[in-house]
Amino acid sequence: MAAVAAVFAGTMAWAGTASAKSFNVNSPDGKINVTVNADTQVTWSLAHDGTQLLTESPISMTLTDGTAYGKGSRLVKAVKGSNDTLEDALFYKKDKVEDKYNSLTLKYKEFDLIFRVYDDGAAYRFISKSKKPFEVKSEEATFSFPEDWKAYIPYVRDFSNDFESQFWNSFENTYIHQEISKWDSRRLAFLPLVVEAPDGKKICITEADLINYPGMYLYNGNGSKSLKGVFAGYPDEVKQGGHNMLEGVVMSRKDYIAKYDSGTSFPWRAVIVSTEDKELTDNDMVWRLATPADPEADFSWVKPGKVAWEWWNDWNLRGVDFKTGVNNETYRHYIDFAAEHGIEYVILDEGWAVNRKADLMQVVPEIDLKGLADYAKEKNVGLILWAGYLAFDRDMEEVCRHYSEMGIKGFKIDFMDRDDQPMVDFHRRAAETAAKYGLMVDFHGTYKPTGLHRTYPNVINYEGVFGLEQMKWAGPEVDQVTYDVTIPFIRMVAGPFDYTQGAMRNASRSNYRPVNSEPMSQGTRCRQLAEYVVFDSPLNMLCDSPSNYREEPECTDFIAGIPTVWDETVALDGKIAEYVAMARLSGSGWYVGAMTDWTERDMTIDLSFLGEGDFVMEIFTDGVNADRAACDWRKEIRPVPASRKITVHLAPGGGFAAKITPAAH
């Protein structure tokens, strides 16, 4: 990938340990200050524009042989530097990403410790220099706050009082908004997590470049003002089990969390800082910190796009002369629908492979997979196959080779439900092997993104989100509408998500109920349209039935025409858990999306990002009765006013979506 305007500042070094033990690194704009104390225990703290956000927070890593990185370690040298590059981004929310930071590298005999300070946060990572095999027994990752601030906490959803049961989870839950000291001491939380600081500032904690190491959970078990990292132990005994015998169930674990043959770079621990909530909706920290793709590798074959999907709508079709389900006739119908609307892909979700066999070479007799692939190719539609994790991992090379030769375009891999070291490494191996055979990967049933989609751009999406599938079974006590205007500020900071929007059955708060076979969304129709703009999702599902979409041609045409990767993203407005507005550019066309919580509101949207010229808007707004009948919407085409300001009314649970193009002259 291209990088321009590279600047590496002169280094500043201190030899030995008799001199300075405390170091300060400022962000390029001077507003963020990181202080690192490299005495007998390494600690770090962070302030923004005079406000202390992190107090002294100890960090270290301990190996099974007793070696400790960051505790009692003798500093050899400290080196400061800086970087200012503009990186090309593939299949992302913008085509270029600025990577501008100041850095501090603490050099020790056995390891390095690197800090980077950006205008929007800071990150650190350990790098082992070991020339022999070693095991990491534990890691100390602490985030200490000066006051008992509130946080938006994504606890592990299904839990018992022991951590081991919580290490097996789908990384899906809504957020609990509470003081850090009131943390539920029985529960772990996954990342990202956002903490509220004074003056509207927010702190988002996550990790990046997680390649071969367990993922980090956060925990507070003593009612303090600090959060600490928790990591799953290395699996010892793993048995086949779980959903349809497609999961690896950990029966016991080793007394260490990771093992290596020699030195390695560990993940970045990232602390992102915003002064306005909307800044979190367009943050590049995780992407910047990820390992770049091999510059010699060709990923031009990767084609993001939209997917006609059958699982959410339960394979339901109307007005056809065949029984719908997992069979050739149903899938040909979905392929025809995709072809009619320029939808790039159709997915065959769970059901095409023989159940409970964990063998992707065993196809059910109702499906002629080669015939469907050929039929889809004739229609200029690609097929993507769902795969349980264990079935895919059992013979990964042969599975990828076989289905690539058949013309399959990718896999949606599901039910990993862990992030210990071997499972994290599985994601890398799956991405690498799939890339070898020209296959895209959508990781479902997985943890949050940590940048693997930069390292392997064929990784086109992730779940790790409490998505629309929950509306098939979640009761009215689940507030999906508020969640929808929370995740752009938290989960989306880490990267894209497979939320699977597009419901054509829409319900007001009082009318919603779970119906598994004919599900509905909470909130309005225009909210569903807006989610295609607001949510970052390079492989984007159309979750509803072709029958329902054909009855709503204008909404369907709008959804089908929306790009899934972008040249530019603009965060327009937003307040976490209340409302959000985003604009995204593809070619010469801008798309704008806005959503509210259950509070109806009039939102003024500033379109000054359009620049000079005349523009036309195709807009979808909540209908006058959308507060009662959430399917009510209206469409207008009108010029963008010279003031570049428009005011839109959002119904409770409502949304707004627009396509803006240069006016024809």
Image: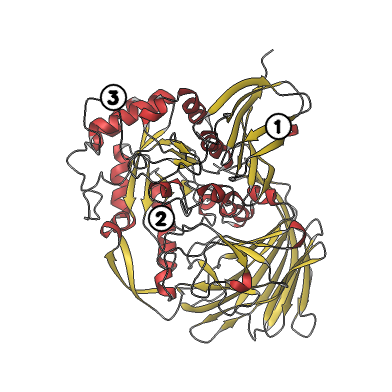
Residue 349 at x, y percent in the picture? 32, 44
SS label for mark 1: strand
Task: Decide which of tag 2 and tag 1 comes sooner along the chain.
Answer: 2
Residue annotated with mark 2: 445
Q: Considering the numbered disc 3 on the image, is that residue within a helix, a strand or a loop?
A: loop
Residue tagged 1: 647
Instruction: Tell me, for residue 546, which label it has, or none.
Output: none
Question: In percent of the image, x 55 and y 78: which residue is there?
Answer: 221
Front of the two marks 3 and 2: 3
Going from N to C along the chain, the mark reached first, 3 or 1, is: 3
Which marked residue is nearer to the observer: mark 2 or mark 1? 1
Which sits in the foreground, 368 or 10? Answer: 368
- Quarter location, residue 665: top right
- Vertical placement of residue 374 versus 653, above or below: above
**Circle 3 crowding by C-alpha within 10 Å: few under 14, some 14–19, many from 20:** few
Residue 621 can be seen, yes or no:
yes
Name the residue that disc number 3 marks: 319
**Label 2 to label 1: alpha-carbon separation:** 39 Å
Which residue is found at the position 17% from the left and 41% from the top?
365
The chosen color scheme is secondary structure
Q: Is residue 113 above or below residue 570?
A: below
Mark nearer the N terminus (3 vs 2): 3
User: Which is nearer the eye, 435 or 189?
Assistant: 189
Question: Which quarter of the picture shows residue 116?
Answer: bottom right
Q: Is residue 475 above or below residue 311?
A: below
What residue is at 33 percent from the left and 25 percent from the top?
378
